[in-house]
Image (cartoon, rainbow, N blue to C red):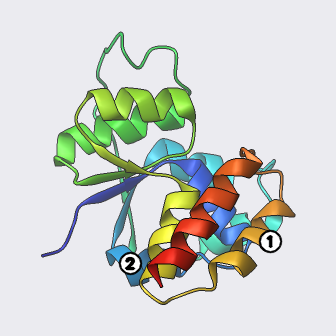
Amino acid sequence: MKRVVVADTSPILYLHLIGEIELLPALFHEIHLPAEVYSEICHPNAPRTLRTWALARPNWLLLATAPVITDPETASLDAGERAAIALAEFLLADLVLMDERKGVRVSLRKGFEVAGTLGILDFAARSGLIDLAESFDRLKATNFRYRPQLLEDLLARFRLGK
């Protein structure tokens, strides 16, 4: 059964930066992307390689306009996060891809399963698609914010599960 997956900007950005963007179709087949998120990844301040990739938009990346919903719970989130949550609600999504803590908390309260960049990499490693330690090393070379202990815990759990 195909899952309905909606993405916010940061997992797209960081998977692209570490050369692992193709994990998304390998794991989920299709990703629904709100227009606001697409605008963020095509913004002149976004990395040039990300903009080039986004403008050539792969067929597994499905653009959608999120319904405009006045929701006090999402009012303090940025436009991409608000749109991702609104689109997830509209599509009755199975999974929201998002890293920002505040947006993750709201998504969880709304009943969505949520995975961030680290969760996607963990799932891909457990599926045999990547070497988790190598992917983490590439992620550490970006400006991705994380708690170092979290990476170590994920690596240790992965090694135990092998």
Vertical comparison of 34 with 159: above or below: above
Residue 84 locus on image (x, y percent): 40, 41
Vertical comparison of 82 with 20: above or below: above
The reply to whether residue 57 is visible in this rendering is no
Q: CA distance from mark 1 to mark 2?
A: 21 Å
Query: The residue tagged with tag 1: helix, strand or loop?
Result: helix
Viewer-proximal residue, 82 or 19?
19
Q: Which residue is at the far top? A: 72
Mark earlier in primary sequence (1, 2): 2
Residue drawn where x is 54% and y is 53% of the image: 38
Residue 30 locus on image (x, y percent): 33, 72
Residue that numbered label 1 is attached to: 137
Relative to 107, 152 lies left or right:
right
Residue 156 locus on image (x, y percent): 61, 68
Q: Amino acid at mark 2?
A: Leu
Residue drawn where x is 87% and y is 64% of the image: 141
Residue drawn where x is 45% and y is 14% of the image: 75
Query: The residue tagged with tag 2: helix, strand or loop?
Result: helix
Residue drawn where x is 81% and y is 65% of the image: 48
- Neighbour tally class for label 2: few under 14, some 14-19, many 20 plus, Cα within 10 Å: some
The reply to whether residue 148 is visible in this rendering is yes
CB atoms at circles 1 and 2 under 8 Å apart? no
Q: How many marks?
A: 2
Mark 1 or mark 2, which is nearer to you?
1
Residue 99 locus on image (x, y percent): 56, 44
Residue that numbered label 2 is attached to: 27
Q: Amino acid at mark 1?
A: Asp
**Quadrant hosting residue 66:** top left
